[in-house]
Image (cartoon, rainbow, N blue to C red):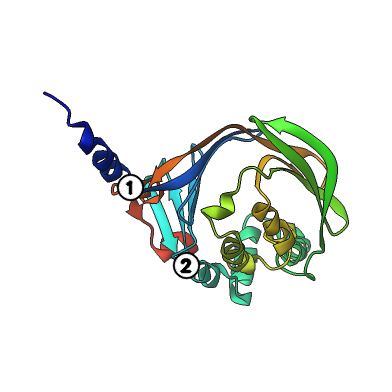
Amino acid sequence: MKIRWTLVPALLLALTSHAAAGWVFHSDGDQEQQTTYIANNRLKFAASDHIMIYDVADNKIAFLNPDMKTYWKGAPETFAASARLTSEDIKDMIEENLEEVPPQEQETMAENLRRQMLRQTGGPPPTVVVNVAPAYEIIAGYRARKHEIHINGEPRQEMWIADAIEVSTEFDVDAYGEMLRTFHSTLGYNVETAFSDPNIIALYNKGWPLRTVTYDEEGYPDKTEVVNVVRKPLMASEFEIPSNYRKLSSKEIFGQ
């Protein structure tokens, strides 16, 4: 069979017509390995036991459990509204945790639980400061600059940003930040929600972090580093939920 070379460009166009320019990042971390995909205003984080997909254009977030073959998908506003704890919910949670506690210890335990929930969901908005450090390193073949993030005056994260990786050409970083802040709104003000602060999200407009070191309250680091970067077209199917996954109901997730 002879190949009509004049048809090759048309064939290649047909094969790639459902793909969009994208990025793939393979990372190793202290806790897990992860692959990140970015294309056509979609972002996917894939680890062995969980997958998250942010569809910025459609304002949808999906959580997938590869082991159970289950998923939940919806708007961040929907998730926040469903997950938000009411005073009655908090009361029920405290009572459930007290069932196995001796009567003479229940009052102290209840007060400790109330304080813990207040720390997680209450308090003023955190203060976030980002400092650009003079340090550079070559990571996964790219020159990356160190950025230091302080939350409420404490060093909480380092991000090494490679400005040659311009994900903002395929991904609306600012809209992604809005999605994260809406999603986190149910958690109140705390360190976790601080990582969706506009000052931190703005770093993704400068480039992509190839190394992230996050410090807990005791100062112990959790490091994740990109070991391989691939620039290639990505099919739309990469960001779709497999047909053999079962959708979870709100009751299964939120008990409602």
Task: Tell me residue 191's x, y (percent).
Answer: 74, 57
Say which residue appears at 53% left-offset and 73% top-offset. Answer: 81
Numbered circle sitting on residue 184: none
Q: Quadrant of the N terminus?
A: top left
Q: Secondary structure at mark 2?
A: loop
Work out whether residue 22 or residue 237 is closer to the camera in this orientation and state it. Answer: 22
**Outermost residue to the front:** 6
- Can residue 98 be seen in the rendering of this structure? yes
Residue 37 sits above or below residue 127 on the image: above
- Category of crowding for the residue at label 2, using alpha-carbon neighbours closer than 10 angstroms: few (below 14), some (14–19), many (at least 20): some
Asked which quadrant contains residue 120, the reply is bottom right
Q: Is residue 9 left or right of residue 121?
A: left
Q: Farthest residue to the right: give it.
A: 153
Q: Quadrant of the C terminus?
A: bottom left
Q: Which amino acid lies under the numbered mark 2 shown in the image of this protein?
A: Ala
Towards the viewer: 23 or 237: 23
Image position, residue 169 (x, y; %): 55, 54
Numbered circle sitting on residue 242: 1
Q: Residue at x 63, y 66 (%)?
A: 181
* Label 1 residue SS: loop
Q: Where is 10 relative to 187, above or below?
A: above
Tell me if mark 1 has few (under 14), some (14-19) or many (20+) residues whose alpha carbon lies within 10 angstroms of its own: some
Q: Residue at x 49, y 40 (%)?
A: 49
Count of labels in the image: 2
Q: Which mark is residue 75?
A: 2
Q: Residue furthest left?
A: 1
Alpha carbon separation for disc pair 1 and 2: 19 Å
The outermost residue toward the bottom is 87
Mark 1 vs 2, N-terminal side: 2
Q: Amino acid at mark 1?
A: Pro
Q: Quadrant of residue 235?
A: top left
